[in-house]
Image: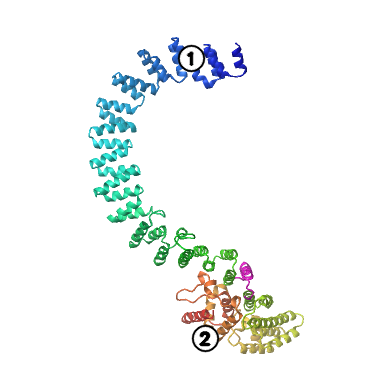
Amino acid sequence: EDAEKLYKSCHRHDLLNAFYQASSEWQQALETAETHDRIHLRTTYYNYAKYLESMGHKNLALVYYEKSDTHRVEVPRMLQEDTSSLEIYVNKAKDKNIYKWWAQYMESQSDMERALQFYERAQDYLSLVRVHCYMGNVQEASQIANNTGDRAASYHLARHYEGHDDIKQAVHFYTRAQAYNNAIRLCKENGLDDQLMNLALLSNPEDMMEAACYYEEKGKHLDRAVALFHKAGYVSKALELAFATEQFAALQLIAEDLNETSDPALLTRCSDFFIQHSQYEKAVELLAAAKKYLQAVELCLTQNLTITEDLAERMTVTDSKDLSEEACKELLEKIADCCMSQGSYHLATKVYTQAGNKHKAMKALLKSGDTDKIAFFANVSRQKELFIMAANYFQSLDWRQNPKNLKRIIEFYTKGKAPDLLGGFYEACAQVEIDDYQNYEKALDALTEAFKCLSKAKDTPGGQQEVKLTELQQKISLIKKFVHIRRLYPEDPDEAVRLCEALLEEPEMDPAVRIGDAFGFLVEHHCQQGQLQTAYQKLEELQKLLPSQSIRYYISQASLDALQREMGIPLESGDHKHVPREEDEEHILAWRFRELRDETKEELQHLSQESATKGAGFYAPVDMEEVATPAELPRHGSPSKLTGWVRRAFITEAAKRSMVTLEELLGSTVQAGQEQAESY
C-alpha cells in the first residue's frame, strides 16, 4: 500500500502499472494504462493476454491479442493444436496476412485447392502463379499475370517460360515485370532484333549501350545503334558512327543536343557538315558552342544571318584563357559590326560598350533614333566627344517644336565643354528666327547667348576666334538697331523711318538684317501714310536689289493690293502669301534645288564657306554618319537628306519659285544633293 501511494504521489504511472501487473491486479493495471499510461497500453494488453492464455482462457486471450495487434502471430500459435478452431478464426478474421499464412499452411499440407482459394483471398498473385505453374496450369497463371500486372508474378512466369524454352512468352513477361535486361539478354541470344530496339529504349543507359554495341558488332541496323548511343548519352560515339555510315538524318537529331560541354572537334565537324548542306543557322550555333567565334561571325556576315541577343551573349567573351584581351575586344567589335550591318542598333550598342568602344556604341545608338536612350547613354558615359555627338544629333531633329530636344542640345554642349559649338547653335537659332519667323527680338537674344559662349571658347590658330567675335558683335549691333526701329515706330514713326533708311546705308547690313525686311518696313509705313507713290518707289528699289525673290514674303497682301489699285500696274498674282507647310516640304525642296542649279549656285558656295568659317553648331562641318538617323542616311540612287537648318533655309526661299517639271526635278535633286554633301 505504501508503494502504491508513493507511485501515485509522484505520478509514476508507468511504475504503478508494472506494480499492478506484478501483483496480478490486472483490472487496475488496465485502468491505469488506459487512463494514465497509454504509452504502455498495448504492452499491458499483450501481457494480460499471455496471462489469460496461461490460465487457459483462450477466447478472452484472443480478444486481448487482437487489442495488442499481435493476433496475426500469437493467435495461430495459440490455436495451432486446435485446427478446427483456427480455421473458424481465419474465416472470421478477414485479414489478408492471416489468409496468406493459412494458405501457406494449406500448401504445406499439400491441399493446393484450398491454398489457391486463400491465396486469392489474400491477393497474393505471386503465390497464385507459382502454385498454378507447379500444378501445370500455365494458361491460368498467364491470365492472372496479364490481368493483375503484378511484376513479381510476371517475373516468376517469365522464368518458367524461359526454363521451358518459350522465348517469346518469356520476353513478354520479362517486359511486363520491367526486367528489361533479362528480356534484352534473351533477344540477343535468339536474334530478336526488332524487339531488342524497343526494349533497349525502355531500359537504363547501360542496357542501351549494350544493345547498341550488339547492333554495331552485327553490322546491321546501324541507324538503331546510332540512336541508342545517342539515347544512352554517348554522343561522341553516336556522331562517329553516324559520320562513318553517312546517316545525315541522325546527325541532325544528335546536333540538337550538342552544347559547350561537347568535344570541340566534334562540334567543328558537325558545323562543317551543316555548312555543306546549307544549314547555316545550325552551323553558327555549333561554331559558337565550339568557341569558334570568329568563324561564326564571318559566317553570319557572308550568309546574312541575323545575330540574336542570345547568340551574341554566347559569343561575348570578356575573360578567356584562349584569347588575349585585345583579341576579345576585336571579336566583340566584329560582332557589333555585324549587328550594325543587320540594323540591330541597340544590340550593336551593347556589344560595342562591352568591347569598351563607346564612340562606336554612340554611333550605333544614333542610328537607332532612340532619343531617350541616346541622352541616357551620353549622361552615363560622361565623355566629351559623346556629349558633342549627342548634341549634334539632336540638332538634326525638330528642336523648335520639341523644347526637350532644345534643352538637351544646350545641356550636352555645356557638359561637353564645347562653347564654340554651343555658340554656333545659338547663332543658327537666331538665323531660323529671322528666316522663318522674322522675329528679330528672339534672334537678338540668341545671338547674345552665342556671343557669350564664343567669348569663353579657346582661340583657334590664326586668330579666327577674334574675327568671329567681331563679326558677331557687328551682327548684334545691326539687329539691335532694327529692333529699336520697330519698337520706336509706334511712338515716333518719322524717326523710325529715318533710322531705317540710315540702316540701309550700312555696308554689311545683310544678312544680319535682311534687305527685304528693311524695305518691307518702309513700304508698309508709306502705304499706311497714304504715300503710295513713295511706297511704289521703295518697292521698285527692292525688286532691283532682289530680282529673283518674291516681294510677297516681305510685304503684306493688303499693301500690295493698295499699290496695285493706285498705280494700275499688276503686281505678283495670288490671293495670299504662301506659308510653307510641313507636308509641302518635298515640293519645296525640289523648287529650291532648281534654284540652286540654275540661278543661285554661287549663293550655295557662299553658304558653305560661311559654314566652314563659323565652325560651330549647325554651321560646323558635321559627320553625317554621326548625327544622321537611319531614315536620313543616304540610300542607293538618292541624295543624302539635309539637316534641319538647311531644310529650313530652303523652305524660307521656296515659295519664291515656280513649279518645275518632273524631269527637271529628278536631275536637279541629285545634283543639288551631291553639292550639299560636298559642302559638308
Query: Any magenta on residue 400?
Result: yes
Assign a secondary structure to mark 1.
helix
Determine the CA span between mark 1 and mark 2: 129 Å
Please name the residue shown 59% across and 68% down the image: 383
Instruction: From this view, report whether residue 121 is shown above or below residue 282.
Output: above
Instruction: Please identify the quarter of the rendering in which residue 440 is found.
Output: bottom right
Q: Which mark is residue 485?
A: none
Q: Which residues are magenta?
A: 398-420
Packing grade of label 1 (10 A; few <14, some 14-19, many >=20) is many
Q: Which mark is residue 48?
A: 1
Closer to us: 521 or 230: 230
Residue at horizontal 67 percent and vertical 88 percent from the top: 507
Q: Which of labels 1 and 2 is toward the front?
A: 1
Question: Which amino acid type is shown beneath numbered disc 2?
Answer: Asp
Residue ID for mark 2: 598
The answer to whether residue 615 is above or below residue 359 is below
State whether residue 134 is above or below residue 288. Answer: above
Which circle's residue, 1 or 2, is located before the other in the chain? Answer: 1
Tell me if residue 13 is in the magenta stretch: no
Residue 625, horizontal then vertical, whole percent? 52, 72
Q: In terms of depth relative to the viewer, which is nearer, 112 or 287?
A: 287
Query: What amino acid is labelled 1 in the image?
Result: Tyr
Q: Position of residue 21 (x, y in %)?
A: 52, 14
